[in-house]
Image (cartoon, rainbow, N blue to C red):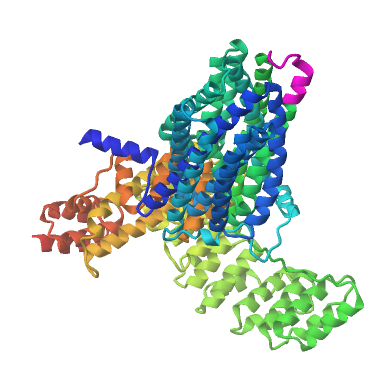
Amino acid sequence: MLPMRRLRQFWRGVYDVRPGEGVRTLFMAVHMMFVLFAYYILRPVSRALFLNKFEIDQLPYLYLLIAVAGGLLAYVYTRVAVRASLKTAVGWTTALSVLCLAAIWWVLRFNFDWMLYVLNIWVSLFSIGLVSQAWLAAANVFDSREAKRLYGLLGLGAVLGAAFGGGFTAALAKRVEPRDLLLASAVMVILSYGAFLVVAAQKGVNLSGAKGAEPEEDFALGDILAALRKHRHLQVIIAIITLTYIVDVMVDYQFNAMAKAAFGRKQDLTAFLGAFGIYVNMVTFGMQFFLTSMVVRRIGVGGTLQIMPVVIGLASLGVMVAPRLVVSSALRLAEAATRYSFNKTGMELLYLPLPTDLKNRTKAFVDIFVDRFGRGIGAMVLMAYSALFVKNAKQLNITQVSGLIFGFCVIWVFFSVVASREYVSTIRRRLESRRLDLHDARITVTDAATVTLLEKALREGTPRQTAYSLGLLAEAPGYDIEPLLESLVDSPALPVRTKVYDVACAAGYAGLVEHAGQALAGPGDMREQQAAVAYLLAVSPDGPITDDWVMRAATDPNPQRRSLAAFAIQRRGHDHGDRLRKLLNDTDPAVASATCRAAGALGDRMHFEPIVRRLSDATVRGAAIESLAMYGPRICGSLGDILTDEKSPTAIRRQVPRVLRLIHDQRSVDVLFTSIGEKDVGIRTAVIKALNRLRESAPQLNFGASPVTQQILDEAKYYYELNAQLAPLRSGGRPQTAASLLARTIEARLNQTQERLFRLLGLRYSPNEIYNAYLAIHRRKPGEIAAALDYLDGVVDRDLKRVLLPLFDLPERLSEHGQNLFGIQVKSAEAAVRELVHSGDAWVSACAMAAAAELSLKGLAREIARVGEQAGAETAQVARAAVETLA
């Protein structure tokens, strides 16, 4: 059983086909296989016939003709394709390919030299057109997450087709006339179309709706070029494709020259080229089957794209040292094998972050035109090389060509690194949501017309318009605001009177002292009275807000007066009568809140502990947090002591991080990190949230990677443990039972744990981008989820990625991942409930106790009793009831 299990794990590690994906994947791979089968019949036949007829120095001219014809085809194909559905385009391409093969087969019987040029050009265009079209169809059949898992299988189908095609050609080349093999290729094209129709008929596949542009849009080459200028991602793709085919042309030229020198008869040369195709595809098959998917997951798209130029560069150095056919064949083998395995998969994945309409509109054009463009550049380089350095076409200097290949590989590696960055950057931009920042425009009062308008608003506007206009006029240079203050201080509108005192306070106008005193004499509104106190203290510091007034107000039975006393102490900046200490214990929340703010503003350390005690009072908590934050970094150590002291009340400890997040100092970060692994989930969550807020508001602080990484791993393990505990409870409980309540509670804890994981990731990586990824996943839209996971796959470190990404797998796979990653076994109901009773989470523990009683788990009675003895009052009560039920 163990070997079989390991085999299944290996298979899933290499290729992971999910339910509902099997038919799509199989027939898409079969479609790829027949397309490549057809091509690998045509390729050795066309090249052998050409080399048998012409000298090797004619080959660069053929490459150049292919490039020119390819550019024209790219324009024509794209112009037609954007007006038709992808399904229709594939049908027409298939029909035209079969007709062209039959026509070329017939004309070749007349032995026209020019027809060999036509054949080679057409074969090259066939490979680009049909293969590119197949990958475009795949991009519309699978989303990006499916593609990461399944493109390896599609590439495997392509490799098998190439191997079969090469073997078929090698076996028959000496038995039949090479041109007759074109008819066999036509049969393979027809079979590929049959597989495509099966894929198109699958549920959820809408290739009829996949178009390069809407039918009413008029395609223009300028549109394509504009998209290329706008998107740097596309520019990088073009650079890599160009370099790929420049190098391909040079390697092919070098290989064909040496093959022509070794084989004189066209049958022998055709058989050799066909047999070589078998070896190429055997190596490619091995890479694709065992390595490609694994390599993409481990080193990402950028790393995968770097494999081909590195391998070719090293192989070209080998040819420089030993210029023989076998070494040149090894170079050609390395180039072809990596191109159809690592490079092809990497390039197709490189397209995935692009918007679908942009991808469909430009991919065929880029693939076809840039392919031809790269080959054309390669051809011109070879023509220049031949003109300058080759005196005899039959005596090619392999060392010089290998040097050119090595130089282009160095440039290629550079662009592969750039591609890796652009891939992540494009996904990041796709994930980012647009935010509109609105800024209120302040009116600058500089002219008489504006002043007149504001004065009219004072007389005729609403109270809020009047208050706003008063503030603007107070800022007008040279404007006499005092008459307006006198006339508006008795306004029936509260916002206007409050604004009058604010403006008079700022202006230092002392003409409203009597009115302010009257506002304080009656019950009045708190906001107006606070404005009046602030005004009186500003323009008349010696009275009427004296120590006696503060003392009387602090002992007044009216809570509003006591609150005003605290506000007055705050504005005065001193507390001569030590009134704040008594007011901090006031039973009225408004008074206590005002007193906390006053104490925080004064910053006297004697008030620290009374304010801390107020953190447990929900009605005063907000003011207490703001007040403690006013003390600044000097209290971080004391707050840290409270946070780590298990004897301190939990209700207070959970609020300490909310204070620290408002103190933008490195000491806050350091204190929070000491409790990032706190076993109490509520405290741990508060700590992580506080670190998130500090990271966002004070990014200059140092958030070390090491403790964050470890906590991410711990949270992931906790997630898998919760999932293992939930598994036996998910199906066992009926609605409205203790077991179902426990299951729902664990599900809620799983969601909270996932949120903490994303918050922790926000400490290591860009907070905004991680938050966007979190939102995309929780909106549960497949396309957004795929983009979010692609982003995480691209930016998260490998040691974290292997633990995090499986969290978003299918629910039924989570238990397997937990076992493979952390050795967490699925629990029995009794074992799960036992662990939850001891969880340390009061609510989870209480729910588990109730579930144990409901499920008659008598073996847990003693443990429930022991936990209940050490728990809070509510949990202890549940424990006693559970023990009585189980007795």
Q: Position of residue 716 (x, y in %)?
A: 38, 45
Q: Position of residue 254 (x, y in %)?
A: 63, 21
In the picture as drawn, the residue positioned furthest to the left comes out as 887
Frontmost residue, 819 versus 210: 210
Q: Is residue 667 left or right of residue 398?
A: left
Q: Is residue 769 above or below residue 380?
A: below
Q: Quadrant of the N terminus?
A: top left
Q: Is residue 174 left or right of residue 451?
A: left
- Residue at the image point whose x is 70% and y is 81% from the top: 464
Q: Is residue 389 on the magenta stretch?
A: yes
Q: Is residue 12 above or below residue 267?
A: below
Q: Quadrant of the C terminus?
A: bottom left
Q: Is residue 723 on the magenta stretch?
A: no
Q: Is residue 639 visible?
A: no
- Residue at the image point whose x is 68% and y is 76% from the top: 532
Q: Position of residue 269 (x, y in %)?
A: 55, 22
- Residue at the image point whose x is 53% and y is 42% from the top: 794
Q: Is residue 35 above or below residue 387?
A: below
Query: Start and end of the magenta stretch?
Result: 382-396
Where on the picture, by quarter, is residue 407? top right
Q: Is residue 589 visible?
A: yes
Frontmost residue, 355 versus 428: 355
In the picture as drawn, the residue positioned furthest to the front comes out as 110
